Image: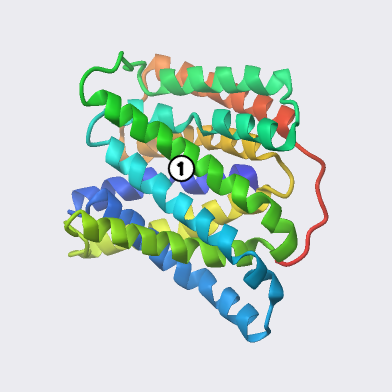
């Protein structure tokens, strides 16, 4: 399921490419992506409210904070692209497993296995090679871009940390049924604050892009990633997100004809091996859960 989630999320790059070429802004794409995905899962929350489910009322504050963290992840990541190249931004956003591992160690006083750090290091090196190894030392506005990308990584780790324990109490469907709508509202507010540029899809290609991202990367990919928190540590799930550029690059090669260099291919192999080590070291015993 964790592997399937990354294949689904990896398809977002091609759909985002299509949406950008159709005239949509990055934040508008994220807002539509979360909004349409929320309409898919929102009926679960409404049904729970009609039944008077006490779990949602008790956990609404951490769920709301988690949703805002998810929105913040998208906003800071996309904002960083205005200052630094895509390869640099993607690599820095891929540092989320570091922040997740440090937070888990501090909050739960748990040790992180050496194999996790070894796998994470290999995965980050592979991601750097896959990005073409064009990462330089920051100068001027790039410092702000780097900070925004790292903030996006930390916010995504915070989102998964906040929702992991809730998976057992109220189930994955209820978790995403609240966090996705909250994130969507946060993104629309961010879009309004920026002037609402290119907010509404103006062509069939633009609509296909946002609908496709809502169905596959978000409703399927991110929801499956949430569900996998029942079986893996947050740091391991974050490490799995390093697979996204591999699948995105493979799809771009097949569909768009964007060939990978030999260095990038070796980077993909190293990244896959590193993620396998990190997930193996970060796996936890499956926990019996309630809800769906």
State the image coordinates of residue 147 (x, y, percent, origin top left).
35, 30
Seen in the picture, residue 270 relative to 188 is either above or below; the reply is: above
- Indicate whether 158 appears above or below 220: above
Can you see residue 218?
yes
Return the residue found at the far bottom: 50
Query: Percent x, y for residue 16?
Result: 32, 48
Q: Residue 188 or 22: which is nearer the viewer? A: 188
Left or right: residue 47 compared with residue 33? right
Residue at image coords 23%, 61%: 192
Q: Residue at x 82, y 42 (%)?
A: 285
Secondary element at image label 1: helix
Residue 253: image quadrant is top left
Residue highlighted by disc 1: 10
Counting from the top left corner in percent of width and height, residue 173 is at 62, 65
Q: Is residue 53 left or right of residue 35?
A: right
Residue 25 shown left or right of residue 34 in the figure: left
Question: What sort of colour scheme is used for the picture?
Answer: rainbow
Disc 1 packing (10 Å; few <14; some 14–19; many ≥20) = many
Residue 248 appears in the rendering: no
What x and y, as percent, mark residue 69? 47, 50
Residue at image position (63%, 44%) is 2
Total count of labels:
1
Point out the image quarter for the C terminus.
bottom right
Residue 214 lies, with reference to residue 40, above or below; the image says: above
Residue 43 falls in image quadrant: bottom right
Instruction: Say left or right for 97 vs 213.
Output: right
Q: Nearer the viewer, residue 286 or 129?
A: 286
């Amino acid at each position: 399921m964790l592997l399937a989630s990354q294949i689904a999320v990896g398809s977002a790059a091609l759909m985002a490419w299509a949406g950008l070429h159709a005239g949509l802004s990055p934040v508008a794409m994220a807002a539509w992506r979360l909004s349409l995905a929320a309409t898919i899962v929102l009926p679960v929350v409404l049904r729970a409210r009609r039944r008077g489910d006490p779990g949602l009322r008790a956990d609404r504050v951490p769920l709301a904070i988690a949703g805002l963290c998810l929105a913040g992840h998208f906003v800071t990541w996309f904002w960083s692209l205005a200052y630094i190249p895509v390869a640099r931004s993607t690599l820095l956003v891929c540092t989320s497993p570091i922040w997740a591992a440090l937070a888990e160690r501090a909050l739960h006083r748990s040790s992180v296995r050496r194999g996790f750090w070894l796998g994470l290091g290999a995965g980050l090196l592979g991601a750097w090679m896959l990005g073409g190894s064009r990462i330089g030392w920051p100068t001027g506005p790039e410092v702000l871009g780097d900070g925004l990308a790292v903030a996006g990584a930390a916010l995504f780790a915070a989102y998964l940390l906040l929702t992991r324990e809730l998976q057992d109490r109220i189930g994955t469907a209820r978790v995403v049924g609240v966090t996705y709508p909250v994130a969507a509202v946060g993104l629309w507010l961010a879009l309004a604050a920026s002037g609402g540029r290119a907010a509404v899809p103006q062509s069939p290609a633009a609509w296909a892009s946002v609908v496709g991202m809502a169905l596959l990367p978000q409703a399927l990919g991110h929801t499956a990633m949430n569900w996998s928190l029942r079986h893996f540590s947050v740091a391991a799930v974050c490490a799995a997100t390093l697979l996204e550029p591999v699948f995105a690059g493979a799809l771009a090669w097949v569909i768009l004809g964007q060939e990978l260099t030999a260095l990038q291919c070796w980077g993909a192999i190293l990244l896959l091996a590193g993620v396998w080590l990190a997930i193996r070291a970060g796996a936890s015993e499956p926990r019996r859960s309630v809800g769906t």
